[in-house]
Image (cartoon, helix red, strand yellow):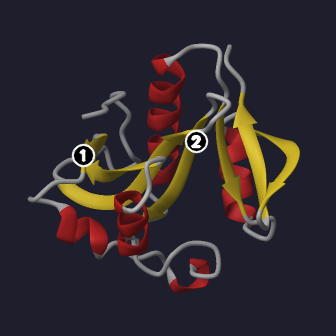
Amino acid sequence: MIDSGLLDRAGRRITLRPVDDDNWRAVADVAPRDDQREWVAALAARYLLLTERSDVWTSLAVYADETVAGHVMWGVDDDGSRWIGGMVIDAPQQDRGVGRAVVRTLAGWLADQDGGHPVRLSYHPDNASAARLYASLGFVPTGVMEDDEVVAELRPA
């Protein structure tokens, strides 16, 4: 379990846990709001399948106290950079600070794994709410595009 001690605005502790036999169905059913589906998968099941078929990505269940609230995955690129991807916060769990706590928690954990490597993520340039969130957490666009997404990074302190 990855636990930075962060709480959402409802006072629930946000933790990241392995996807396992007990929670995979709840994680697979995580779905964003309808207006977000052009930028993220309609169900987190797509990301779970990606992690099963890839050596790069690892899925994590997002918990708010003991409730599955989302999905996020992480990976390590060939250059050693750490990546956050596939974040989906379940629609009823949004607007409570869950996503912010997830990114802060995972970015901190990834940065601690092997100091000196940046933590990166990508988002569609039309996804203004994601751009604001990531910028507020210190992620800076690199000028590089990955497919049709802006790559941003959090440089080590």
Name the residue: 73% across, 52% down. Answer: 132
Above or below, comparing residue 3 to residue 68 in the picture = above
Above or below, comparing residue 65 to residue 95 in the picture = above
Q: Position of residue 77 (x, y in %)?
A: 61, 38
Q: Quadrant of the C terminus?
A: top right
Looking at the image, which is closer to me, 5 or 116? 116
Residue 87 lies left or right of residue 49; in this view the side is right
The furthest residue to the right: 143
Q: Position of residue 28 (x, y in %)?
A: 29, 71
| Residue 1 occupies quadrant | top left
The amino acid type found where label 2 is placed reads Trp
Q: Position of residue 57 (x, y in %)?
A: 45, 49
The residue to which callout 2 is attached is: 83
| Residue 7 occupies quadrant | top left
> Residue 18: which disc?
1
Above or below, comparing residue 143 to residue 76 in the picture = below
Above or below, comparing residue 75 to residue 93 in the picture = above
The amino acid type found where label 1 is placed reads Pro
Query: Label 1 neighbourhood size at 10 Å, few (<14), some (14-19), many (20+)?
Result: some
Name the residue: 75% across, 44% down. Answer: 152
Count of residue discs: 2
Name the residue: 79% across, 67% down. Answer: 148
Query: Label 2 neighbourhood size at 10 Å, few (<14), some (14-19), many (20+)?
Result: many
Looking at the image, which is closer to me, 26 or 101? 26
Name the residue: 72% across, 67% down. Answer: 127
Looking at the image, which is closer to me, 19 or 95? 19
Mark 2–mark 1 Cα distance, whole angstroms, equals: 17 Å
Q: Earlier in the sequence, mark 2 or mark 1?
A: 1
Does residue 139 appear in the picture of this structure? Answer: no
| Residue 137 occupies quadrant | top right
The furthest residue to the left: 22
